[in-house]
Image (cartoon, rainbow, N blue to C red):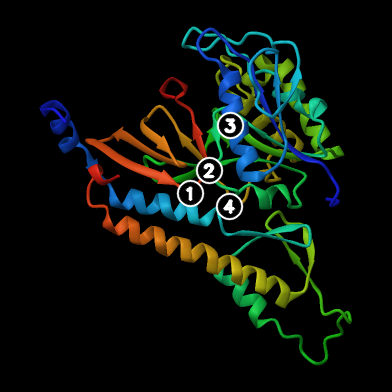
Amino acid sequence: MNTEELRDAARVAYDRELAKQNINTAIESRMTVNYGGGMFIVTQELIAFLHAWMPTPNLSLNSDGKIYMMDAYDVPVKVLPYELLHICQRRWYEVMNEFAAEYEEFTKIRNAKQL
Amino acid sequence: MPNNSKIGCLIAAFDNENHIYFDMAVMAADRVAKHLKIPVTIVTDSVEGDSHEHQRIITEKPGGNWRNDNSTWRNLIRTQLYDLSPYDRTLVIDGDYFLCTSNLLPHLNGSADFIMTKEVYSPVNRRTETFKLGNTQIDMYWATVCIFSKCEESYSIFEMAKHVQEHYEYYSAIYEYRRVPIRNDFIFSVALHLMGGYGMRDYGFKSYPLVNCDSLMDYDKFENDKLVYRYVTDKIYANSINGIDLHLMNKDQF
């Protein structure tokens, strides 16, 4: 690097909050799954709902135990709760593991030269 | 959507004085094939360029549309893509939209008959927002990425878009936005506003913001699906973004 290039490199700042938001945005757009012809966004709320779903004894259900849920595009989809739960948990696990790995890389970057 | 339905991608590319859009479209098509593993068809007037393994539909160059950089923008074929598409379910992307992930797959395999990008993420100001169109402030859609099924609803939207394109000056006066250049984003924003009960219906992608890498950014390098870029606000900054699909709008920086 010549003096001009070194001076240029030293002048460039690095915004860590922006870098973090870039990672967050990428992670959020990966948190989607297909099920029963619909698309669901995997959130903590969805996982908690599916996990908590326990039909009360007096509730008359179809014998297959399926329920209708609205997907991300407001289309009703017939869902077997534990099946969708399994898919969501797997997706969560994959994406959050990727996120943890990326976050570790992110913490090592202290300035623009390391990009 | 039936399991045996044909899913594919369309990219329109018509060269002008400044840019060879066909080559750019082939690069974008390669990325679609790599990440989504679906067939791609390039809609173009170019019979000569190497399209790799991608199909092409040869059609007439659309009419000229003047931009403020003194080039002719051949963008006015988007409203005809419903008629031209050989697929049951079609992904449409711009030639400068570079897939870096398979994030579109759940949307392609999902239930929505027609969706178009609406939320925009800026890797400069780190905001995700929906832009508003003109003085009437209706939601602005970006025709950069769109998925549609061959069905009555999508057909009606494209027919309305053709009508808006044909009467662009009239609608620009009604919705109070700039008349030139003619933008597909504006055409579809108006068409979706009209067809969706005057803004009652949301046709936007869910959990899939459009990452606009626009003129505020200088691209340093783009390797292994990672973009390193610079921008200026109060001072000069550099940063990087990866793991997300990118709309690389600065064609001169390729």
Give the chain letter at badge 2: B
Amino acid at circle 3: Ala
- On screen, residue B230 above or below B180: below
Give the chain letter at badge 4: B
- On screen, residue B122 above or below A18: above
Using the rendered image, report if marks 3 and 4 lie on a common chain. yes
- Real-space CA distance between mark 4 and mark 2, rounded to the nearest whole angstrom: 16 Å
Using the rendered image, report if marks 3 and 1 lie on a common chain. yes
Q: Which residue is mark 2?
A: B100
The secondary element bearing badge 2 is classed as loop
Give the chain letter at badge 1: B
Judged by depth in the image, the label closer to the viewer, 4 or 1, is: 1
Q: Which residue is mark 3?
A: B28
- Few, some or many C-alpha atoms within 10 Å of disc 1 (few <14, some 14-19, many ≥20)? many
Marked residue nearer the N-terminal end (4 or 2): 2
Give the chain letter at badge 3: B
Please state the horizontal and vertical placement of residue B17, each as a whole percent of the image.
Answer: 53, 7
Residue contact between numbered discs 1 and 2, judged by CB atoms under 8 Å = yes
Residue contact between numbered discs 3 and 2, judged by CB atoms under 8 Å = no
Amino acid at circle 1: Gly
Q: How many marks?
A: 4
The secondary element bearing badge 1 is classed as loop
Q: Give the position of the C terminus of chain B as an image quadrant.
A: top left
Residue B10 position by quadrant? top right
Q: Which residue is mark 4?
A: B207
- Real-space CA distance between mark 3 and mark 1, rounded to the nearest whole angstrom: 16 Å
Using the rendered image, report if marks 4 and 1 lie on a common chain. yes
Please state the horizontal and vertical placement of residue B114, each as a whole percent of the image.
Answer: 74, 41
- Real-space CA distance between mark 1 and mark 2, rounded to the nearest whole angstrom: 6 Å
Marked residue nearer the N-terminal end (4 or 1): 4
- Residue toward you, B130 or A22: A22
